[in-house]
Image: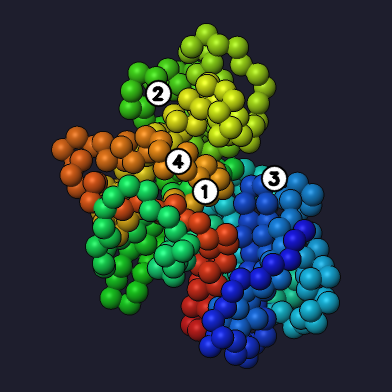
């Protein structure tokens, strides 16, 4: 576990009257926790491996009892908000890419909070987009954002998250989307072959089946089969490492296919939402690709929509480089909930 702090402007240090707030960002692999001790002052960040805890409650209790929290003398935490990589449609939450399941109300009582808000992680991430500074995002390709128009969001990691922000007279509305589970659509013969290979394993091949860590491994097996090359049993991390190091042509082709497929899906989101404010790319995979993503076919594929090529060439695409942007979004959602209580 590592304790960190996010920088905060000096003007935003007045403590909350109701005490510190718990913030959490729960993915299929890692559970990230933090305390917001004053508006915008997010600190005591720790990352716990989900596999190390039987339940979300156990991970949350472990964080609250950790030296980072106790030695800081933080007490009286009564309000919290959790962003989780899963649909949130009622009190019961069952994670798609991990075995945790829980009742929101039962969890609230177990940790003795007055308020516990649980939202989809990409709904929270979408809520952070207007607050991202120029140093917290990196533009790939051209295009210029049009103010007052929708923003799109996509991110590949353990799964594939999709969301967006829609402008309104009272501010932004974050979409409760599960767009990562749309049916995958190939854009060339090689991707048709990848899809046909994936059909051997899955009756329905969603975008997430290929745009994720497990998806990179699936693309690797599919391309090895398609090109009659021997396939090793490689993790997504190792495939990426070999590709970035220039050690394996097949691994590099896998990463290129991944980036191009992501471009197609991101372009679909842009035209579906009319996201002339731009498309943002989050998740754990793309930011780690660095310059390899910049020189990939992502942007060309993003713009490749026939008669809508000109439309999409004007839409900017950004990789989110901020380390913990979901905390900013889930904090805003909690503040709104408490203000309306």
Which one is closest to the eye, mark 4 or mark 2?
Answer: 4
C-alpha span from label 2 to label 3 = 31 Å
C-alpha span from label 3 to label 1 = 26 Å
C-alpha span from label 4 to label 1 = 8 Å
In the rendered image, which quarter is residue 56 located in? bottom right
Does label 4 or label 2 sit earlier along the sequence?
Answer: 2
In the displayed orientation, state which residue is furthest to the top: 228
Residue placed under numbered mark 4 in the picture:
293
Residue 183, position as x, y percentages in the image: 40, 34
Does label 1 or label 2 sit earlier along the sequence?
Answer: 2
Q: Does 225 appear above or below 322?
A: above
Residue placed under numbered mark 3 in the picture:
99
Which one is closest to the eye, mark 2 or mark 3?
Answer: 2
Which one is closest to the eye, mark 3 or mark 1?
Answer: 1
Does label 3 or label 1 sit earlier along the sequence?
Answer: 3
Residue placed under numbered mark 2 in the picture:
191
Residue 211, position as x, y percentages in the image: 49, 37
Q: Residue at x 65, y 26 (%)?
A: 234
In the displayed orientation, state which residue is furthest to the front: 246
Residue placed under numbered mark 1 in the picture:
287
In the displayed orientation, state which residue is furthest to the left: 307
Can residue 42 be spotted in the picture?
Answer: yes
């Amino acid at each position: 576990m590592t304790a960190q702090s996010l920088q905060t402007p000096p003007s935003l240090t007045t403590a909350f009257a109701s005490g510190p707030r718990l913030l959490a960002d729960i993915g299929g692999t890692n559970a990230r926790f933090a305390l917001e001790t004053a508006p915008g002052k997010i600190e005591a960040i720790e990352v716990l491996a989900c596999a190390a805890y039987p339940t979300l409650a156990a991970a949350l209790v472990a964080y609250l009892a950790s030296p980072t929290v106790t030695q800081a003398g933080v007490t009286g935490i009564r309000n919290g908000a959790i962003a989780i990589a899963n649909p949130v449609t009622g009190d019961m939450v069952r994670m798609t890419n991990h075995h945790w399941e829980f009742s929101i109300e039962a969890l609230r009582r177990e940790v003795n909070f007055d308020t516990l808000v649980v939202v989809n992680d990409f709904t929270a991430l979408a809520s952070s987009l207007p607050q991202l500074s120029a140093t917290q995002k990196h533009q790939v390709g051209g295009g210029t954002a049009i103010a007052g128009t929708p923003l799109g969001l996509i991110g590949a990691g353990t799964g594939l998250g999709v969301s967006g922000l829609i402008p309104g007279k009272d501010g932004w509305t974050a979409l409760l989307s599960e767009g990562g589970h749309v049916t995958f659509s190939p854009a060339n013969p090689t991707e048709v072959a990848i899809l046909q290979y994936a059909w051997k394993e899955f009756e329905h091949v969603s975008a997430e089946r290929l745009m994720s860590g497990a998806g990179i491994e699936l693309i690797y097996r599919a391309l090895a089969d398609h090109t009659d090359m021997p396939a090793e049993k490689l993790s997504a991390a190792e495939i990426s490492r070999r590709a970035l190091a220039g050690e394996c042509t097949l691994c590099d082709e896998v990463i290129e296919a991944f980036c191009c497929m992501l471009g197609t899906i991101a372009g679909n989101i842009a035209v579906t939402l009319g996201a002339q404010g731009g498309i943002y790319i989050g998740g754990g995979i793309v930011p780690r690709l660095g310059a390899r993503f910049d020189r990939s076919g992502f942007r060309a594929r993003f713009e490749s929509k026939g008669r809508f090529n000109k439309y999409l060439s004007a839409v900017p695409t950004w990789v989110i480089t901020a380390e913990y942007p979901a905390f900013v979004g889930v904090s805003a959602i909690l503040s709104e909930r408490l203000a309306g209580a």
